[in-house]
Image (cartoon, rainbow, N blue to C red):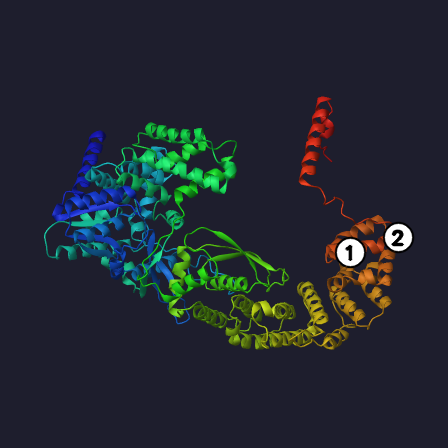
Amino acid sequence: MEAAAAAAERQDFLAYGQRLTSGEGGFFFFPIRHHSPACALHLAAALSEIRPRAIVLEMPADFAPLRPLLSHPDIRLPIAIVSVADGEKTSDERLPVGYWPFSATSPEWAALRLAGEFGSAVILADRESGARLAAAREEKKGESGEDGEDEPRQDEPREDETGPALLTDEGQLAYSHYADGLVKRLGVRDFNEAWDRLFESRAAEKDWRGFFRDVGIHCALSRLTTPAEEIAADDTLAREACMRAAMAKATALPGEGPIAVITGGFHTPVMIDPPSERPEQTKAQAGPGIQTKSYLIRYSHDHLDRINGYGAGMPSPRWYERLQQRIAEGHDDPFTEATTDVVLDLTQRLRRDRPNFTPPLPSLAATVAQAQALADLRGLQGPGRAEILDAARSCLMKGEDPRSGSPLMEALHAELTGEGIGEVPSGAGAPPLVEAVRRRARALGFRIEDGTERNRLLDIHRKPRHLAASRFLHVMTLLGTGFGRCLRGPDWAGGVATDVLFEEWTYRWSPAVESRLVALSIDGDTVERAADAVLARRVQALGEEGQAKNAHAAIRLLMIAAQAGLARSCGALIAAIGPAVATDPDFGRVAVCLSMLDNLQRGRKALGFAGMPGPDELRLIAYRRAIDLLPDLETARDEDVPRYVDALATLNEIAEAGAQAGEGEQPLDLDLLDEGVAALIDADLAPRAAGAVAAIGHMSGRLSAEALATRVIGPLQFSVGEPPARVEALAGLLAVQPALLKRTPALLERLDLVLAGFDEADFIEVLPALRLAFTALAPDETDALAAVIAQAKGSDLDLAPRFSGGLTEAEMLANARLNASFAELMQADGLGSWLEERAP
């Protein structure tokens, strides 16, 4: 009984598959997978045979104006249509919201090309991209909520701001319950391998009806095993209603001949057998759409490969292009021919990039032979992607642990993926900003013809062209394009490595770069205008996010803008920083702002502020504000004391360095700090703050060395407080004036006397706090203090490096060989255990 039911069910599915290409009701239905060469080749054969008068194609309807451009002879694939949406508020940026990529293996591309050749009408049947975006936003809000807890800080980049929102998503096909069961049934690694075995292996066959029958059955099973509530959770039902409406529109067109309906395979079942309910009333369609504008942009092989992770395409696009090309050329064994191409190109890549990993010719021949053998074993017409990878692991990897990564396999994956980037015709209507950025990049020596990642070393202080290239990279970072990433260079905001002469960047032109520029095109037709608009929005956002008085965030933004070459556009930002600093109530935060502004003043030439009074005036404002807040040390909470002492150290260091004015700057009044500290010398301060104030007081002549020693060493000598607290005053001194201990004999002698008087238990009790306090000393300061102590003790302290830096590579290798020979002799004499490390 069960067998009979199963047989009847199989017959039903077989009949369904045959209906798809029987011309039922004047329609031919072609279920496809995006970027599948088998689908593209069989679709081309089918369209050439049936010559449809109209093609109903699953693509957003608002892409129709771009169709004439898609037939331009200058197009080089891959390319993509990017749909850009207007912001909901005037301060919003227009972001790229939808991508529709075309590869050489896209069935949609084959359909559009053949439609032009046959004169077939084309109706783009999917919902407009703006409506799909609105539905996606609603779905995302429902998943993540709107509490805003995960919002990044203003000075941090937003996560994946230019990430793809793919309009070719087919996750319901690739990740259905049926697909999961199929993977297990076939014993393969993932859905892509299952698809290759079932369908890509049939790319060279001539029976397009049988091919689409089987693809249709596969997709119908995927849909049947997908819960109805999951299908209704997004805008799938509303989209399918639009597709059926497009079918009705196609029937009204004049002329004779059938109509081809080309949709993602998951949608095909409801195209041929419409449901009885009215999905037009679904929640997804109820929401309003978003205004969008669409452009053609260049796309790349690696982005086509990446979108497979979204269930919207196939991996290794260059492999499938090779296979499709060999089939189109009519080769008797196109799979083996394409496999051979991959192996030979891999060899060239390894010789160029990793010559030590280049395999010998017999291994290459064995790789092709094993790929063929695996295909025969698996019942395939020829090797596919999985067979190539398996054969390479078997024949080319020698002594490598695949768990830790393999340079050879990485090169093979790169070869299967490809490194090409497409080209759109010059008349494609790309915004002027895109062309302006391309011209600027080429003029500054950046290579953007392909998607290869490259490095660039820039001498920013001595070569004007290199400085211009640095500012271009920084402005592209400000624009959020993801074009470049700084590996090393001066950090003006943090005050780190500001004396470094070079910046090192890695950069790569990608579709994300281009789409981001398209999104920003509304802001202007030049890099500077777009950057000014983005900067203005960032400044406005500071106020909207309640950070209008956050001087730290504003100064950081000022640094970013300056490195991008926008110093002359920062007037409004500079004007906002002054009042924010002057009213900031937190001493520690003001000291950090002062440090950043001091860095900015010292780097004013490289940052483009030379001759501009604004940064120096801001530094004076921050300095005076920090002095005004010095009394807060007296009322500081315990948890704020370490931060305030660090702030006092910063203030003291900047005051001492700024007392003598440099060219084009005003001096800092050191007397203001002296008077502020004098008022705190006898105040009731926390021990660490008291030690820091005493150190500065001594440097200004207000405390003798003996008084300083009493204040700093006294708590340790007379056991005042718990053991950690006894060292706090000394820690405060070391935080603000670490050299005092070395330069003040009375202080060092008092400390030596106290430590010498400790018994072992007392010393061990305070040792952790002492060690922590002395971490304030830099390595050279530690060496200098050690030398002073050694001299006082009458000891010869040798601080020279323990290892000579003069050894050559040959000498090091000779020593290593000698050590190995010695170890062998020890083993031969039965003394190998002497070489083993013994447990403590």
Residue picked out by circle 2? 793
Q: Is residue 594 left or right of residue 6?
A: right
Q: Secondary structure beneath disc 2?
A: loop
Identity of the residue drawn at 81% across and 53% down: 786
In front: 401, or 218?
401
In front: 427, or 549?
427
Which dot marks residue 820? none
Which dot marks residue 723? 1
Q: Is residue 747 visible?
A: yes
Q: Is residue 384 left or right of residue 770?
A: left
Q: Secondary structure beneath disc 1?
A: helix
Q: Check the image and report above or below for 821 versus 171.
A: above
Identity of the residue drawn at 76% across and 67% down: 690
Q: Position of residue 438 (x, y in %)?
A: 41, 61
In front: 370, or 443?
443
Residue type at tag 2 = Lys
Q: Check the image and report above or below for 772 versus 608.
A: above
Count the marks: 2
Q: Is residue 409 left or right of residue 186?
A: right
Among the two numbered marks 2 and 1 on one chain, the one whose residue lies closer to the N terminus: 1
Q: Check the image and report above or below for 52 versus 8.
A: below
Pick the quarter of the image with the N terminus. Answer: top left
Q: Position of residue 145 (x, y in %)?
A: 41, 59
Q: Is residue 306 left or right of residue 732?
A: left
